[in-house]
């Protein structure tokens, strides 16, 4: 399996409205998109890694028309934001290109400084020919710099290395069943029945999942 790590920079292209909303403020910055997925009707769920004033991040999200629901957890100037949002901008377009060419994104997408501006660094997995085709389909206004091309080396930062098998099973089921939708489409009780667990155990698992995401993504 081949992997390519690239840095993308842009000129007058909206990468992601909410990421840019936070990044434009000096008190809080988005360091990475840990996960993003479309759900339905143009809606998305995502996890963002934040650095800075988390209270200010909450205030900004409160007033953003693109943020449907959110939760920000963390302390000491480091945090993770769970978001349900209306649009993912260029990031969604990039994910569509990867899907079209049967490439896999190795999360996270990291924001980095490129000269006096910001760019995003990401790693994709697939064949050499698929990677070349995807590059040729990048939108206008996007500049690509190849940082690494070679055999895939698994990262230790994947969800499967942070969560137990049971916690990962619950997390993935919760996403599929609409637990993170607005309004929620399932409950702790319904998830517990599907996994043959008690409601209390499911609640405890969610608390541990949140704690591990913060520790794994922020430390």
Image: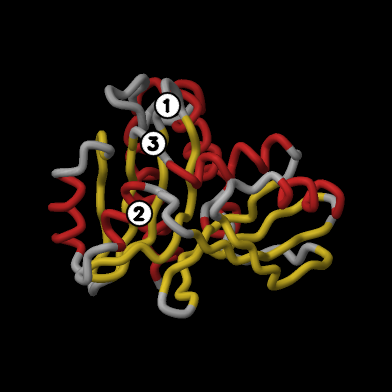
What is the CA distance from the residue labelled 3 to the residue labelled 2? 11 Å
Closer to us: 112 or 156: 112
What residue is rendered at 38% in x and 61% in y?
49
Specify whether 54 is left or right of 142.
Answer: left
Horizontal and vertical percent position of residue 27: 20, 70
Q: State the image coordinates of residue 55 (x, y, percent, origin top left).
A: 14, 60
Quadrant of the image containing the N terminus: bottom right
Q: Residues within 10 Å of mark 2 (few under 14, many from 20)?
A: many
Labelled pair 1, 3 in contact (Cβ < 8 Å): yes
Q: Which mark is residue 19?
A: 2
Q: CA distance from mark 2 to mark 1?
A: 17 Å
Q: Is residue 69 left or right of residue 116?
A: left
**Rendering quarter of residue 53:** bottom left
Query: Mark 2 or mark 3, which is nearer the start of the sequence?
Result: 2
Q: How is the image coloured?
A: secondary structure
Mark number, residue 90: none
Residues at discs 3 and 2 in contact (Cβ within 8 Å): no
| x, y percent for residue 206 | 37, 43
Residue 42 badge: 1
**Is disc 3 surrounded by few (<14), some (14 to 19) or many (20+) residues within 10 Å?**
some
Name the residue carrying label 3: 87
């Amino acid at each position: 399996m081949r992997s390519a790590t690239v840095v993308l920079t842009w000129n007058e292209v909206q990468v992601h409205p909410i990421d840019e909303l936070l990044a434009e403020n000096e008190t809080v910055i988005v360091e990475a998109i840990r996960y993003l997925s479309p759900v339905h009707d143009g809606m998305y769920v995502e996890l963002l890694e934040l650095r800075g004033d988390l209270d200010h991040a909450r205030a900004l999200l409160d007033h953003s028309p693109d943020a449907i629901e959110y939760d920000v957890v963390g302390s000491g100037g480091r945090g993770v934001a769970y978001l349900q949002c209306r649009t993912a901008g260029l990031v969604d377009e990039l994910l569509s290109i990867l899907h079209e060419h049967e490439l896999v994104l190795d999360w996270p997408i990291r924001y980095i400084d490129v000269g006096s501006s910001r760019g995003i660094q990401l790693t994709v997995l697939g064949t050499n020919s698929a990677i070349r085709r995807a590059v040729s389909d990048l939108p206008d206004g996007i500049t690509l710099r190849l940082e690494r091309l070679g055999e895939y080396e698994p990262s230790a930062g994947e969800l499967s290395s942070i969560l137990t098998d049971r916690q990962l099973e619950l997390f993935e089921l919760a996403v599929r069943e609409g637990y993170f939708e607005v309004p929620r489409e399932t409950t702790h009780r319904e998830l517990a029945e599907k996994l043959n667990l008690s409601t209390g155990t499911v609640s405890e698992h969610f608390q541990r999942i949140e704690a591990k995401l913060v520790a794994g993504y922020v430390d």
